[in-house]
Image (spheres, rainbow, N blue to C red):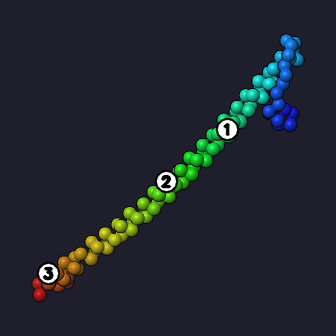
Amino acid sequence: MKKGDLTAEFDVSGKDEIAQIAQALSEMAQNLRESIEDIRQSSLNLTDLSKSLDESTSRQSESLNQMARDIEEITSMVENTPSECYQIRGCDEQDGEFR
């Protein structure tokens, strides 16, 4: 355990102070193993969530870009509509008079 090996098991027998310390160290090692596993699992979950968030953000970005392109197209159509209307009606854009 001194070198970080938390898989070491203690064969604890007896009821003296040394046995109690050995039992406490064994329990501490078990608790540390569980904590490390919890942290590892949390890290994996965060990695998965990060990937999911990245994918979602990319989809939303593409959707917003498409919406911007659509708005530009609609704006262009709206801006050209009056001149097309005048041409269809036979009006002069300058004074709105029929020709």
| Residue 23: quarter of image | top right
**Disc 3: which residue:** 89
Disc number for residue 22: none
Crowd class of label 3 (few under 14; some 14 to 19; many from 20; radius 10 Å): few
Tell me if 33 is positioned left or right of 68 in this view. Answer: right
Residue bearing mark 1: 39
Mark 3 or mark 1: which comes first in sequence? 1
Viewer-nearest of discs 3 and 2: 2
Is disc 1 in contact with disc 2, using a CB cutoff of under 8 Å? no
State the residue at coordinates (70%, 31%). 34
Please state which amino acid type lies under the numbered disc 1. Ile
For the point 84% across and 24% down, the residue is 10
Q: x, y percentage for residue 97? A: 12, 83
Name the amino acid type tagged 3.
Arg
- Farthest residue to the left: give it: 98
Residue 88 visible in the picture:
yes
Q: Is residue 67 above or below residue 89?
A: above
Residue kind at label 2, given as amino acid type: Ser
> In the figure, is residue 94 to the left or right of 25?
left
Above or below — where is 25 with respect to 44? above
> In front of the other: label 3 or label 1?
1
Q: Secondary structure at mark 3?
A: helix
Where does the image place residue 12, in percent across and percent down from the top left? 84, 19
Question: Of marks 3 and 2, which one's residue comes earlier in the chain?
Answer: 2
Image height of 44 relative to 2, above or below: below
Mark 2, residue position: 56
Question: Based on the displayed image, in which of its 4 quarters is residue 98 positioned?
Answer: bottom left
The x and y percentages for residue 49 are 56, 46
For marks 3 and 1, give the CA distance.
73 Å
- Position of the C terminus, as image quadrant, is bottom left
- Say few, some or many: other residues with alpha carbon within 10 Å of mark 2 (under 14 / 14 to 19 / 20 or more): few
| Quadrant where the N terminus is found in the figure | top right
